Image: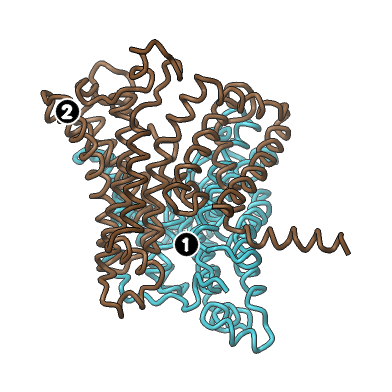
Chain colours: A cyan, B brown
Amino acid sequence: MVELLESSLRLGTPLILAAMGGILCERSGVATICLEGAMLWGAFVAAIVAHYLHSPWSSIVPCLVGGALVLGIHAFATQKAKADHIISGLVVNLLVAGSTPLLCKFLFGSPTNSPNLARADRFHELAIPFLSALPGVGFIFEEMPLTYLALILPFVLHRLLFRSRFGLRITAAGEDPDTLLSCGVKPDRVRWVALCLGGALAALGGAFLSVSHASQFTRDMTSGRGYIALTALIFGNWRPLPTLLSCLLFGFADALQIRLQSAEMIPIQFIQALPYLFTLVVLVGFVGKARPPSAIGRVS
Amino acid sequence: MKSLAFSLSFACTLALAVAAAIIWFSGESPLALWEALRASLSSEGLGYTLFYATPFVFTGLSVAVSFHCGLFNIGAEGQLYMGTLAVIATATALPHLPPGLAIPLGILAAGLGGASWGCLAGMLKAWRGSHEVIVTILLNFVAYSIVDYSILYLYRDPVSQSPETLKIPGTFSLNTFDELLSPFSVSLFRSTPANLSLVLGIIVALAVGFFLFRTRWGFELRTVGANARVARFAGMNSALSTILALSLSGGLAGLVGVNEVMGHEHRFIQGFSPGYGFTGVAVALLGRNHPVGVICSALLFGLLHNMSREIEFATTHVSKELSLVIQAIIVLAVATQPFLVSLLKRRSRGRAS
């Protein structure tokens, strides 16, 4: 059981990071289905940088910048060129899905994956002294560095969103951009910042997949996690703390899927569909009450 | 029509420039692009171009119908696999039908298979208010599982090493253009898989146009898409239109199975689609969601797809995913066209003064 919980925490980590990024973007009034693209790009950049510089830590900054750039395209298309948010999001996803294999083939000769990272080139568990020895909950303190970040981030974001000027501006840009404008703040500027920050966080979620959870970049390795993160934040009502819980729930579904694969009672194809089915059921069953930011997706 | 021609040429110019830049950056000669274009327009290449254009006609129409109702169907990929599965299931269950019955039945099965998957998304959207983009994406993954299971455990070819089904009975196969022309000893497309499905695509496109612009149901569907409030005040049932639009959209995507199974491979090969469904969004957008526009842009995307295959063969560093990047650039160009055009105008006015 502890193993299953630990594995849920691990599989929940990329979802939490991406969903927190998504909260910033969506609360500022931009529909962001390109979380998937930002994650995939982050996974790619992190794997490449860790491969060439032989250190997982060196991949963090390029990954953040890469994610910010990817959602920068989304910001340009939606804010500057007034394109439809969903179409722009699809463009970004397509661009990343196409350019990552293209670059992989150019750099390593194979479009499907990057070379395996050596043990020293990826993240490892970092046990926190004393806390990791606690009975019962000790496993939380023997995790990857990015998992700690994912557990702290929602609380930071909660403070930022509800207790700071910047956070209130983000919410205002998503709820009532005209009022924000009449207060002398340009909503599109706020959205640019929110999108770049959000993209950076989502990319970090991708980095967890390629240099922490696995040891290489493989084509389409996010396999829909961006959309699952999006559902998680909708289920969490666009608030950081409930979203943290819903991401852990989706992480649990993924962990359960991996556990059941070894059971061999049900065909593996159906077990693999479990996280997606679970996401669907949550989306269909419980999200009726969700209230999105009122200006979301509106082209100004 | 003039604006359609303008967007087409505008997007194409931009896309070709980007493609040339990528190829040049990879250390290859951008002339590879010209070679690929020439190869794609030769008699053999043209056959492949038309063969690849056929699924784009179906998925482009699929996305266009959902757009008209104000919906984004990103699930064409899953729907086309479900349609293909339905063809295989029908052909396996009824092996002794005469061709006159088998072919219409196969086409019907492909449509219904895709429509069932689209209808599911439509019901969830209409009755539960779930966002159709997320629902259709998630349903794609569920469809992949169902299809993979069916190929591997229900219809698998036990002799074959790769994951594919047994061949379906010959009565279910559509003729290729080459087979049709052989009695006249003409070979237009030199034994390429371009087949009658393209004709089916054109007929279906005309039918979709008639449905959307000449029938009451099509009018209601478009009204719901244009303004759901107005539609409700006019007494239209927007839930019904939503379900109808996504079912129809799924059915059109499912028809890809006709081209793949009945027209070409005669079996279901796991993962045959290089993203036909996702490209459908680009096809519909570039074709301005009009059936005729969709056919034009499907031909263009068929050409692009074939060209990127040719480039992958001819070069060592460029892979066929080049076409995905080009598609993204084309959609971006279409979506931001008003902005880009105004930018260009301002630039040229500045120079004139």
Q: Chain of mark 2?
A: B
Which one is in front, B221 or B168? B221
Please provide percent x and percent y for residue B179: 34, 17
A215 relative to A106 in the view: left or right: left
User: Which residue: 61% across, 85% down?
Assistant: A180
Q: Is residue A157 visible?
A: yes
Q: Chain of mark 1?
A: A
Q: Secondary structure at mark 1?
A: helix
Which quadrant of the rendered structure holds the C terminus of chain B?
Answer: bottom right
Judging by the rendered image, the residue that carries numbered circle 1 is: A16
Judging by the rendered image, the residue that carries numbered circle 2 is: B100
| A247 shown above or below B269 | below
Q: Quadrant of residue B308?
A: top right
Does label 2 lie on the same chain as label 1?
Answer: no
- At label 2, which amino acid type do we have? Gly
Q: Secondary structure at mark 2?
A: helix
- At label 1, which amino acid type do we have? Ile
Check disc 1: other Cα within 10 Å, few if <14, some if 14-19, many if 20+: many
| B171 shown above or below B135 | above
| A197 shown above or below A267 | below
> What separation in Å lies between label 1 and label 2 (alpha carbons)?
56 Å
Please provide percent x and percent y for residue B13: 66, 43
Please provide percent x and percent y for residue A44: 58, 44
Check disc 2: other Cα within 10 Å, few if <14, some if 14-19, many if 20+: few
Which one is in front, A279 or B121? B121
Which one is in front, A275 or B100? B100
User: Which residue: 39% across, 68% down?
Assistant: A245
User: Which residue: 29% across, 78% down?
Assistant: B234
Q: Quadrant of residue A243?
A: bottom left
